[in-house]
Amino acid sequence: MTLKKIEAVFPQEKLDAVFNALTALDISGFTYFSVKGRGARPREMVSSGRGGRVEATHNDNSFIYVVVTESQLPKVIDAITTHAGTGAAGEGKIFIYNVEDAVDIGTKKHGDSSL
């Protein structure tokens, strides 16, 4: 069976919704962390320290990656796009890669059985 790695970057404020949606799916798990970046999404205005406001140099985002079987791919993508997006441009990206193999460190199982 073919394994797929999904990487998604989206606004930090959408993390709880995406986290809950992925947790509800029958997948083995995922990894997430906070990142900063620049994209098409407008950056927030922040205090300059002297009573003024300036545009932030970056956006605060979340980054999630998960490895799933090819059959699980559509439901994971749907969960992310449904819960991270509102339809506006610049809300993030999803990247999908082929995974040659995966090995569970404890059981030493390979492939989809390692998930």
Image: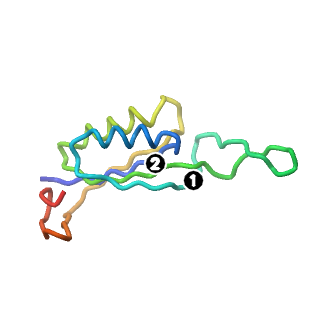
* Residue type beneath disc 2: Val
The residue tagged with tag 2: helix, strand or loop?
Answer: strand
- Identified at 83% across, 51% down, the residue is 49
Crowd tier of the residue under label 1, counting other residues whose Cα lies within 10 Å: few below 14, some 14–19, many 20 or above: few
- Identified at 12% across, 58% down, the residue is 113
Task: State left or right for residue 102 relative to residue 59.
Answer: left
Q: Is residue 33 above or below residue 20?
A: below
How many numbered badges does the structure rendering display? 2
Q: Residue 77, position in %: x, y?
A: 32, 40
Q: Quadrant of the C terminus?
A: bottom left
- Identified at 74% across, 45% down, the residue is 46
Q: Is residue 108 above or below residue 7?
A: below
Comparing 3 with 64, the one in front is 64
* Residue type beneath disc 1: Gly
The residue tagged with tag 1: helix, strand or loop?
Answer: strand
- Identified at 67% across, 42% down, the residue is 44
Crowd tier of the residue under label 2, counting other residues whose Cα lies within 10 Å: few below 14, some 14–19, many 20 or above: many
Circles 1 and 2, Cβ within 8 Å, touching? The answer is: yes
Comparing 90 with 115, the one in front is 115
Which residue does the numbered mark 1 point to in the structure image? 37
Comparing 50 with 43, the one in front is 50
Q: Give the residue at the far right of this rendering.
A: 50
Task: State left or right for residue 111 relative to residue 35.
Answer: left
Mark 1 or mark 2: whose residue is earlier in sequence: 2
Question: Any mark on residue 3, and which?
Answer: none
By what rule are the colours in the image chosen? rainbow
Q: Residue 91, position in %: x, y?
A: 51, 39
Which residue does the numbered mark 2 point to in the structure image? 9
Estimate the spatial distance between the alpha carbons at disc 1 and disc 2, rounded to whole Å: 9 Å
